[in-house]
Amino acid sequence: MRNKLLKGGAVTVGGAAAGLLYFREMIGSDNFDRSARFYRMAVPGYLAYKATDFATLGKSAEERNARFAALDLVWAPRALEIILDLRGFYIKVGQMAASNVGNAFPVFWVRTMEVLQDGVPHKGEETVRRIVEEAYGCKLEDVFETFDFEPIGAASIGQVHRATLTPRAASQGAT
């Protein structure tokens, strides 16, 4: 019986590992790794809240609220840190928490995530230059006469820069 269980467990783990590797290849290793980083933080946080919910069943509202408030102090800043690191879609999720869609988030979470409403960090000069040059297929200076690397604004999926097209790029309709 024990051998059957061990073999069954090995087959299950092997199948799950193969499935994860296949999924990683399908969506791309960067996307998979970013998701994995997020869920390595999110799952333990979720479990901590669920365990607290279970442990405080039958307790007073005051005691339950105090226990959950203590969790908020730990998990909201952790979530913000990883969201800022992962950027893009994850910032959009944090912005939803900040706007408290459906009144789903505690006040501390909303206040913690509010920085994402208008304080999204911008990408640096090297990254901006690479993105622009890949998009246009030439040097940034071939398209723009002036380009301010300090963005006017930055959001979850993009940022805006003040720039002036070169006369040649303007005559070719570059936008």
Image (cartoon, helix red, strand yellow):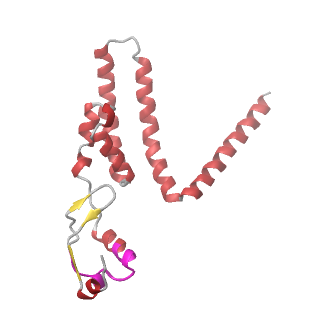
Mark yes or no: residue 105 visible. Answer: no
* Residue 122 visible to the viewer: yes
Q: Which residues are magenta?
A: 132-147
Residue 62, placed above or below residue 116: above
In this view, the residue in front, 108 or 26, is: 26
Residue that appears at 24% across and 85% down? 166
When the figure is inspected, residue 41 is found, relative to residue 66, above or below; the finding is below
Horizontal and vertical percent position of residue 110: 26, 37
Residue 94 screen position, x and y as percent: 33, 44
- Residue 13 located left or right of residue 93: right
Residue 171, position as x, y percentages in the image: 27, 86
Q: Is residue 29 left or right of residue 72?
A: right
Residue at the outermost bottom position: 168
Q: Please tell me whether residue 101 belongs to the stretch shown in magenta.
A: no
> Quarter holding the N terminus?
top right
The x, y position of residue 51, in whole percent, is 44, 24
Which quadrant is home to the C terminus?
Answer: bottom left
- The residue shown at (27%, 63%) is 159
Left or right of 29, for residue 125: left
